[in-house]
Image (cartoon, grey):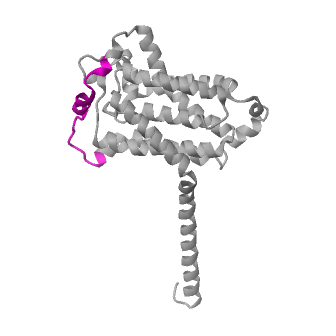
Amino acid sequence: MTSSYLMPLIMTPILICLIAVAYYIFVPEDFKNDHKMNCRGMFSLNTLPYLLSACFVYLLVKSQLAIVNFLEKGTYTNYARYMILVEGDAVAYLQNFATPMLTYASAAIYLIGFSFLLIFTFLLLMYTQNVEVLQEYTIAFIAIYLIALPFYIYAPVPVTGFTLPNVVPLLYDLSPIILQGVRIVDPFLDNCFPSLHAALSVMAMLIIFRTEFTRFKIFSLATTVAIQFTILYLGIHWITDMIGGFILALISYFIATRYRESILKLPEQIMMTFEKRTDIVDAVNSILLSKGLLK
């Protein structure tokens, strides 16, 4: 097993423990009383398709290197120069008060806090059978990834820590395990614009605010604000990336909440069309067989 997969192996038990603790903190008591029924409902046909859809899109993004090779995209254009023209090295000012403790805390928020926010939001909506909000969350989640992926392939922007002379790649300097782990989803360390950390965290927060989970709303707000700081402080994203992430979050949120019903009708219409065509083919075959024209 390569070192690339050590970080997921380390993070997985930590996330499981955090989710177990979060269950007692954020899940309302009314739902805990029906724990067995809620657990059975989590992975029912009402909720499972949305989780599988989100996982599929995530795996699609993880296949970025294979997609680049398939498209035979041999030329590489560094778009960081445009970022420098827009904002210069303004992000470097956030590292003027860098300390080891702040760096470790920021790394934990960036890696674990972000992942926990996205995963637990899914699980909470599934567990409480909040199907409509779960649908919106899944649609927005998928929209963000699908919109961001072409940018990462055709308009790569390297991280600030490896571009600006006054910015240190604090996250990647912590450990080679972190560097190799990040390369699983960002093989060239140039998936900066738009920032997925900004887009997904802001979107998750907006979706959570459509629920009645008051304590989790407060947590999501604090975590989202902290994530915005870490993506700049750790020498990863540009300010423009963060703004692009905000815009992407708002667009995906609008699409999911405004057009949820229309989007969900699309697969139903496709299946109905397929079934009708299948019935027509079966009817034609039956007629041909009855007249001896088809063996």
Write the start and end of the magenta stretch as one range. Answer: 69-92
Name of the residue lying farthest toward the right: 33
Coordinates of residue 213 in the picture (x, y in percent):
66, 31
Quarter of the figure with residue 20: top right
On whether residue 47 falls in the magenta region, the answer is no
Looking at the image, residue 144 lies above or below residue 293: above
Total residue callouts? 0
Is residue 82 one of those drawn in magenta?
yes
Q: Nearer the viewer, residue 88 or 162?
A: 88
Residue 2 in sight here? no
Q: Residue at x 58, y 66 (%)?
A: 272
| Left or right: where 256 falls relative to 75 | right
The quadrant of the rendering that contains the N terminus is top left
Q: Is residue 97 left or right of residue 77?
A: right
Query: At 40% across and 8% down in the image, what residue appears?
Result: 99
**206 or 100, nearer to the observer:** 206
Return the x and y of residue 49 as percentages of the image width and height.
58, 48
Residue displayed at 68% across by 37% down: 127
Residue found at the very far bottom of the displayed protein: 291
Task: Identify the residue shown where x is 53% and y is 52%.
Answer: 259
Task: Tell me residue 228's x, y (percent).
Answer: 44, 25
From the viewer's perspective, is residue 78 above or below residue 232?
A: below
* Residue nearest the observer in this picture, 23 or 16: 23
Q: Is residue 89 visible?
A: yes
